[in-house]
Amino acid sequence: MLQRDHSGRRDRRHDYATVFAALGDETRLALVAKLSDGRPASIAQLTDAQPIGGSKLTRQAITKHLRVLERARIVHGVRAGRESLFELDPKPMEELREYLDLVSEQWERSLGRLKSFVEE
């Protein structure tokens, strides 16, 4: 469900929270890393790859994690014959980085004002 602010626009904070939540899992981070080479991969390829977190995951487990990443728009699946291939979409993470840069700048300004106040 889309969250809306008082003006009716989409609330980007909800989108950011969804991306943070999706990336807040070791397995999903590993899947993002595996897909970051720019090549689509099937569930079988992702399952057969190196174990994640020291143990090999089942196709069902990989599928569940990919669905979470899809809901956060971090990956998207495309049909290729009888199987689905998954690709990384870096845009949500780029948007998140821009948001974090903005928050960081705000903190830097606030800390600068505090430092000026304390040093007076």
Image: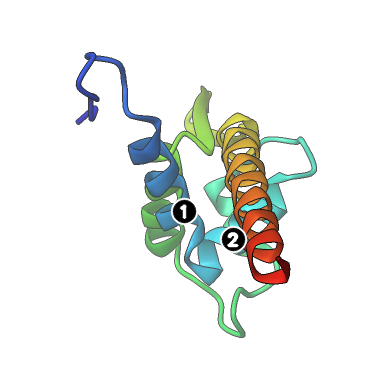
How far separated are the C-alphas under marks 1 and 2? Answer: 11 Å
| Residue 48 position (above or below residue 67) | below
User: Which quadrant of the rendered structure holds the C terminus?
Assistant: bottom right
Question: Given the current orientation, which residue lies at the most extreme right position?
Answer: 37
User: Which quadrant of the rendered structure holds the N terminus?
Assistant: top left
Q: Position of residue 39 (x, y in %)?
A: 75, 36
Whether residue 45 is visible, yes or no, is no
In the image, taking residue 59 as reference, residue 8 lies left or right, namely left
**Between residues 15 and 50, which one lies in front from this camera angle?**
15
Q: Residue beneath label 2, please?
A: 29
Residue at 45% from the left image edge and 67% from the top image edge? 58
Q: Position of residue 74 (x, y in %)?
A: 53, 39
Whether residue 33 is visible, yes or no, is yes
Instruction: Name which residue type carries label 2.
Output: Leu
Element class at badge 2: helix
**Between residues 112 and 95, which one lies in front from this camera angle?**
112
Instruction: Name which residue type carries label 1.
Output: Phe
In the image, taking residue 11 as reference, residue 87 lies left or right, namely right
Q: Position of residue 94 (x, y in %)?
A: 65, 35
Q: Nearer the viewer, mark 1 or mark 2?
A: 1
Q: Residue beneath label 1, please?
A: 20
| Residue 101 position (above or below residue 47) | above
Question: Given the current orientation, which residue lies at the most extreme front position?
Answer: 120
